[in-house]
Amino acid sequence: MYAKSCRICSHKPLTQILKLGKIPLVNYFPVAKELSIKTKRYPLNFCLCEHCGLAQLDYVIPPRTLFKTYHYLTSASNSLIDHFHELASECVRRHFLKWGDKALDVGANDGTLLFEFQKRGIKTLGVDPSRNAVAVAQKRGIKIIPAFFGEKTAERIRARRGTFHVITGNNVFAHVADIKSFLKGVKILLEPNGVFIAEFAHVLEIIVKNQFDVIYHEHVSYFSLIALMKLFNMFNFEIFDAKKILTQGGSLRIYVRNKRKGEVSLNLKDLIREEEENHITEVTTLKRFSEEVHQFREDFCELIFKIKKKKKKIVGFGAPAKGVTLLSFCGIGASEIDYIVDSTFLKQGRFFPGIHVPVYAEEKLATDPCDYLILLAWNFQEEILNKIQPLREKGVKVIIPFPKLRVV
C-alpha cells in the first residue's frame, strides 16, 4: 500500500525521486512447479521527505508478505561471519558487555551474531520473523523468537526475560515500516545505561556511489544521520558514536543511548558534516542521482547486449536481493543470463525472482563453464574474486556493476 506521509515526521506529500518500475519479492525464490503462476510485482519508488530529510519508499508491502518465505542466511557469507565476530569483540572491548550480561539481536536471522556473543559468555535472545532462518538457528541451539519486533513483542519479552545491556539491529532497522513502534520496543527493553547498535546502508554511499540496487521493498527507509538525529530525539535517545563499515557496499554503524550529559564522538560530528557538505537531503542532489541511475542502465545494457551479440555465455554470481532490483530495472533476464550460482542452500534448486533463471550451487561452474560472470553480490567482491581466481586464470571475465561498472 502507498504511504500517505513520512514515517518519521508525518509530513506529506513525499517527493518522488526515482521510479525503478515494478519488481517482485526479492527474497522469494520459486520452485519449478510455481513458474506457471504469474509473478506478482510491486511499484518501487524512491522518495524524499523534504521536511525531515528521510529518503524512503512510498509503497510498502505488508511485512507478513515480505518475510513469509525468506531465503537469506547470514552464515552463507564468510565476510559477514567475520563482520559479526568483530562486532561482538567490539562490544566487549568497549565495555558495552561483560561476561553474564544480556544481549538481544533484532532481525537475528540464523543466529550468527548471537553465536559470537555466546562464545564471549553473553546471555542471548533473538527475534526474527523468518521461520526458515529461525529453524536454522534453533538447530544450532540458539534461542530466537519467531516474531516481528515492536512495542507489543517487547512487552512480552520484558515480562519473561527482563531488560538487556545491548540491543542490536543489523541490516534490519531500515526494514521496519513502523519505526516508532520499533523504537518504543527498544526503549522498553534497553537497560538505563544500555546501548542500542544498528547497522544499515548509508544513504550517502547510495547516492555518491550510485548504488541504486540497494533500493528494494525490504528497505523501506534509507537513513542519514541528519534524519536519524531527529527520529531518536523523539524517544529521548541520542546517537553518541557512528562509523562507516564495509557491509552492503557502504553502511553505517550507529551507537545509541538514553539521553544524558556526556560528549558525543568526533567521528559522529565528522560524518554529519560530510552529509551536510554532500547535500544528501536536498531534492536537487537526489534528482542528479536519478539521472546517473538511468545513465548506468544504458551503459550496463549496452555492455550485456554487446557480449551476447558475440554469442558469449553469461552467468550470475550470487543471488542477493540487490540483484533483483538491478536486473529488473535494466530488463536483463533469461535471454541474457544462463543460470545463477549462490552459496545459500535455501536458494539452490529454485529460480531467481522475476526472471526465473535457475539457481545452483557454485560447483555448477566447474561442469557448465561460462565466458562472463556478473557479480550480483558485488559487495562481497573481494571474497568472490579470490574464490573464482582459478576460473579467471582460465579466461573467464568478471562484470562488476558497482561502485563503478567495469570488466576484470
Image (cartoon, helix red, strand yellow):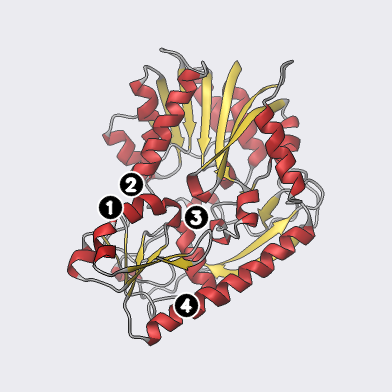
* Mark 4 lies on residue: 303
> Residue at the location (57% across, 32% down)?
152
* Neighbour tally class for label 1: few under 14, some 14-19, many 20 plus, Cα within 10 Å: some
Whole-number angstrom distance, CA of label 1 to CA of label 2: 8 Å
Whole-number angstrom distance, CA of label 2 to CA of label 3: 23 Å
What amino acid is found at the position of numbered circle 3 in the picture? Thr
In contact (CB < 8 Å): disc 4 and disc 3: no
What amino acid is found at the position of numbered circle 2 in the picture? Ala
> Residue at the location (41% across, 12% down)?
99
The N terminus is located in which quarter? bottom right
Q: Determine which of the numbered discs, if any, sits on residue 65 in the image.
A: 3
Whether 268 is drawn above or below 6: the answer is above
In contact (CB < 8 Å): disc 2 and disc 3: no
* Mark 1 lies on residue: 345
Q: Nearer the viewer, mark 1 or mark 2?
A: 2
Instruction: Decide if residue 226 is in sight here.
Output: no
> Residue at the location (51% across, 17% down)?
162
Whole-number angstrom distance, CA of label 4 to CA of label 2: 30 Å
* Neighbour tally class for label 4: few under 14, some 14-19, many 20 plus, Cα within 10 Å: some
